[in-house]
Image (cartoon, grey):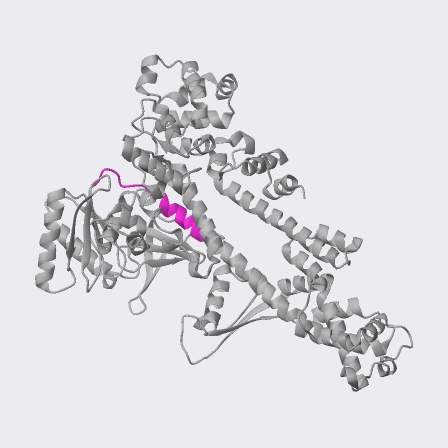
Amino acid sequence: MDYAKVLAQEFDIKEEYAANIIALLDDGNTIPFIARYRKEMHGSMDDQLIRAFSEKLEYLRSLDKRREEIRGLIDAQEKLSDEVSASLDKAQTLSELEDIYRPFRPKRKTRASVAKERGLEPLALEIIKQKKGFSPESCALAFVDEEKGVKTTAEAIQGAMDIIAEQVSDSAEIRKRLRTIAQKSGEMKTTAADADKDSVYSMYYEYNEPVKKMAGHRILAVNRGEKEGYLKVGLAVDEQEPLHVINRLLDKGVNPLCSDILRAAGEDAYNRLIFPSLEREIRNELTDAAAESAMKVFATNLKQLLMQPPVKGKTVLGLDPGYRTGCKVAVVDETGKVLDTAVIYPTHSERKIAESKQTLLRLINKHHVDIISIGNGTASKETEMFTADLLKELDRKVYYMVVSEAGASVYSASKLAAAELPELDLTLRSAVSIARRLQDPLAELVKIEPKAIGVGQYQHDMPQKRLGETLDGVVEDCVNSVGADLNTASPALLARVSGLNATVCKNIVAYREENGAFHSRAELKKVPKLGPKAFEQCAGFLRVPESRNPLDNTGVHPESYKSAKELLLLTNYSDKEIKEAKFADLPQRVKAAGAKSLAEKIGVGLPTLEDIVKELSKPGRDPRDEMPAPMLRSDVLDMKDLKEGMELKGTVRNVIDFGAFVDIGVHQDGLVHISQICDRYIKHPSDVLKVGDIVNVKILSVDPEKKRISLTMKF
């Protein structure tokens, strides 16, 4: 297969670009490196598109590998005809390949194999030939043999029908046609396993929907309902069309006696062998497609969460709420260093509440706390109300924010947390994590397994290996788009940098501890096991603010330093300006001189020149600063305070297929259904909203019993 040609067509790019990406991937280059530093070779495709390209390339290669495996298996049986070989070459999917291989696959004991053992295959072949004047009944007499288990002509004909039915079932052509019919006209039908038992799946107790229209989140919902024993789920297809297709291909219509047998065998093949198999296939395909869609939503949400702007230069007090065991407290300085810890009991007796207040006031004043970060788990609402009440007693403005604590307990019990915070009890470690994830969401959340972060839907129903790969890709892309400070980055953050593995990360940290801070990117070459290829892949993503060379604190790759210096000279920067790294007006100078002309003189492509200009004009820039700042609060609402028609400001916490959940300052997030997001038609809520967006909403309805808040953005 010409992979470059196939992929160029699928991704609508030049064949040259497709060939370049394949060569770059095969040469061991990482996707972030290719996306960022090889733009001229692929037309400035982004990392997500290159990742999708890489996955499709892997699929095509596995398809070709399976094609050759099947060819070899059939050839070993000495049954590889030119026709079969051509069919294998034409197959575009794994299911098509498996359909071709089906007749040659070694089978377990079946009704057809038993009939063949009894010597009935010649009778089946004669019936299939349908010669004029041929009598199946008369011919069957010759196959009656009690020793072989064929006692009557009826049993002989039945055995022949079993053989014919299996042949029909093994036909790749018939399966392909019937699969298309089922996909086009099939309906998913669900019924209650026990209609008297109420559940969250009650809307599916009597439900049917065309397969081609069924949304991914509904497919995953009915699958889960079936798995939990609340639903019976099946595929319904009007059998008339499939049977007509089988009869048309099987029956020549020249011998009515054979036609009746062939029609019955075809019907048996469809009902007993083909339809159950197709039902499994189609449901698996629907589930796979729904899972892919859900993983894309999860990936989009995760990216937005990781790319939330950091709250820089603030001392943060983290609260990990709890009832019986109390609320864990940790104060961290602007660098994330732990200053103090405590345990308070704001949900216990009045005496305990008063003591808790005094403890927090003392910590806030002692460490000049700027913001309080509250985890959104058990007892969060009560802790938030306690905090809002406490802040009124301060003589300066201190804000709070409720943050997702998903994965905090996973982190606190991990080896990484034990290594980072060995002196702290694991319950206090989670309070530290909650404080730090407000300060720098990316640096903190990379320490947690992505699927534990909880911004998706049905993540536990996903293929876990595929989900892990998808989310790991998102984390990698985010870390490399932001960059990492070589002198402060944790091993967990370094491990996500392009080209670095766990061993090299440990060596970088060990080098820092032994030799002090890195003074340049070039010093990385002294780190054991960090060879030239690893340096090429990682250097551009690591920042060294302490370096004398200002380029070491930018996204300009060391391979482009010479070009960057030439650019500064060509745009008339003085030695003094270069030494002071003051290039804010570089975009204007480049525009005046002509970007294309400068790129040619320097010997770089236009995309690389544009990247160099962007980095030099804003050295040390953080792309997250361009995102909306997180919304901080100083007061709290109760669910009973909410009234229909009330207008509020909120933060988008999760975007799913059917809408978005918005934090409006009460313990329960409200749902904006997809139909209430905007006046125009949208395919998916993510077309308009993303995690972290600050939005204006109006309350449509409140149901305190079911803890449901319905919101609209249309007003």
Q: Residue 265 versus residue 157: which sits nearer the camera? A: 157
Q: Is residue 706 left or right of residue 148?
A: left
* Residue 112 position by quadrant: bottom right
User: Count the marks: how many?
Assistant: 0
* x 60%, y 40%: residue: 12
Residue 265 shown in magenta: no
Asked if residue 557 is positioned above or below residue 421 in the image, the reply reads above
Q: Is residue 177 left or right of residue 326?
A: right
Asked if residue 444 is positioned above or below residue 209 in the image, the reply reads above
Asked if residue 324 is positioned above or below residue 33 in the image, the reply reads below
* x 43%, y 18%: residue: 567
* Residue 113 position by quadrant: bottom right
Screen quadrant of the N terminus: top right
Q: Is residue 457 left or right of residue 399?
A: right
Judge whether residue 514 can be spotted in this image. yes
Q: Residue 638 versus residue 43: which sits nearer the camera? A: 43
Magenta-highlighted residues: 297-314
Asked if residue 259 is positioned above or below residue 362 in the image, the reply reads below
Percent across and percent down for residue 138 are 88, 82
Residue 302 shown in magenta: yes
Q: Is residue 17 left or right of residue 405?
A: right
Percent across and percent down for residue 472 are 43, 47
Percent across and percent down for residue 261 are 79, 77
Percent across and percent down for residue 98 are 66, 59
Judge whether residue 496 can be spotted in this image. no
